[in-house]
Every structure is written in structure tokens, then in C-alpha cells.
Image (cartoon, rainbow, N blue to C red):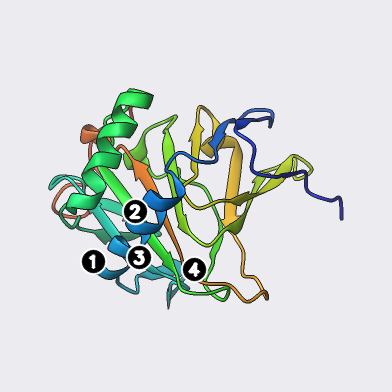
Amino acid sequence: MTALPHFELPDQTLHLPGADLRYQTHWIDIAGADALFATLRDGIAWERHRIKLFGREIEAPRLSCWIGDPEAVYTYSRMRHEPRPWPAALRPLRERLRAETGTDFNGVLANLYRDGHDSMGWHADDERELGKRPLIASVSLGVSRRFLIRHREQTSRRLSIDLAPGSLLLMGGDTQQNYRHALPKTARATGMRINLTFRRLIKDAIPRESGEPGGCMTWSP
């Protein structure tokens, strides 16, 4: 197997054809990242979400919480999730991301990886509610974990990167259309990690109360 190109914590644009990836190591300083991790670890109402995989419902190998504005009902892995209110600790991050990216994120998926056995399988953030070319802002807290990206068809186009605590990874443009990403299990002894993926759900594409998708798929910055 061809070795994955690996990036050792620089602030840079990560170059993959057909993707728009920007990585900033110390988007939150170390002390701030540690304090925010402790606040969210103890303050979020973590749940064990169920996901559909190959026609079967299974428990996700991590803890999660979908947070957002009241209308930001999100359907992923064919499961409908009502948003929990924004905790005070996340509001400054939302405002900072809005100022820096020009995107008014109205929801964030928080994932808690309790140890190296918790993981995220290969997927793309390409749900209808996110629009055609979504911007995903991924903030990492806690221990560093290996993050993998590979092209949907040309699998030689891939990379791995250790996402450092306090780092910000922006995935925009055609990234979700062309690539999938994963956070694999690790046999190394490792501590807890929290990942916050800020998203903007498009109003006309948010599912109706019946749970059926409604409206057209459009992209708004």
C-alpha cells in the first residue's frame, strides 16, 4: 500500500486535487483549548447515537451531541436529530468562525472519543441539508488523533494528518463531493478527544416535521 503523505502540524493549505483544505494548528491557544475541553466534556449532554450501516441499526462507536439553532433539525445516517441549545462555551467559537470565514454556522456536531477504541468510519458530510458545496469547520480538543482523507474513486489521492488540540481544519469547495474522511481506531494508549464540526444547514433543505426532506438543495455562504 502506498504510504499516506503526512503533515506534522504546520499551518498550511493541504493540497489535494478537487479539495479545499486549510489547517491552522493553534487556532485556540493551549490553555484555552484545555479549559474548553474540560468545560465541554463535563457540560454537554453526550448521547450514544444509533446509525444505520448496511441496512442495520448499530450504536455509534463514540458519544455525540447535535447542537444548533431551533430550526436546525439534522438528518445523518438516515436518523433525525433535534438540536440541543447552544451552550455558552460554544457561542464565542461560533462568532469567531463567522467573522473569519463569512459563514453563519447554525449547528455543530460534537463528538467525544473516549479512547483509541472510539472511531469514525469513512464518510462524507454531504447530506442534503448542507447544500452543494458546504464549508465544514472542524475544531479539535483533547488528545491528538490521526485523521484520514481519500478520494472517492482515485484512492491514491489521500493524506493523513494528526489533528492537534486547539487546531482548526476547514473543508470547503468540492471536498465533500470528491473525498471521504475517517478517524480510525488506534491501538496506542490515548486519552479523550472532542471534535466540533460546525455546519450551516440550508433553510430550504432542512427536513419538514414529517421527517421527509423538503425544498431544493442550494448553497449559501
Q: Which quadrant of the rendered structure holds the N terminus?
A: bottom right
Q: Is residue 36 left or right of residue 178?
A: left
Rounded to the nearest angstrom, the CA distance separating label 3 from label 1 is 13 Å
Check disc 4 and report the residue beneath it: 53
Q: Secondary structure at mark 4?
A: strand
Pointer 3 or 4: first along the chain: 4
Q: Mark 2 and mark 3 in contact (Cβ < 8 Å)?
A: yes
Check disc 3 and report the residue beneath it: 64
Nearest to the observer: residue 128 or residue 4: 4
Nearest to the observer: residue 107 or residue 6: 6
Q: Residue furthest front?
A: 31
Check disc 1 and report the residue beneath it: 43
Rounded to the nearest angstrom, the CA distance separating label 4 from label 2 is 19 Å
- In the rendered image, residue 192, in percent from the top left (x then y), is placed at 47, 69
Check disc 2 and report the residue beneath it: 109
Rounded to the nearest angstrom, the CA distance separating label 2 from label 1 is 15 Å
Q: Nearer the viewer, mark 4 or mark 2?
A: 2
Q: Residue furthest right?
A: 1
Residue plotted at (42% across, 30% down): 132
- Can I make out residue 219 in this image? no
- In the rendered image, residue 133, in percent from the top left (x then y), is placed at 44, 29
> Which amino acid is tagged 4?
Leu
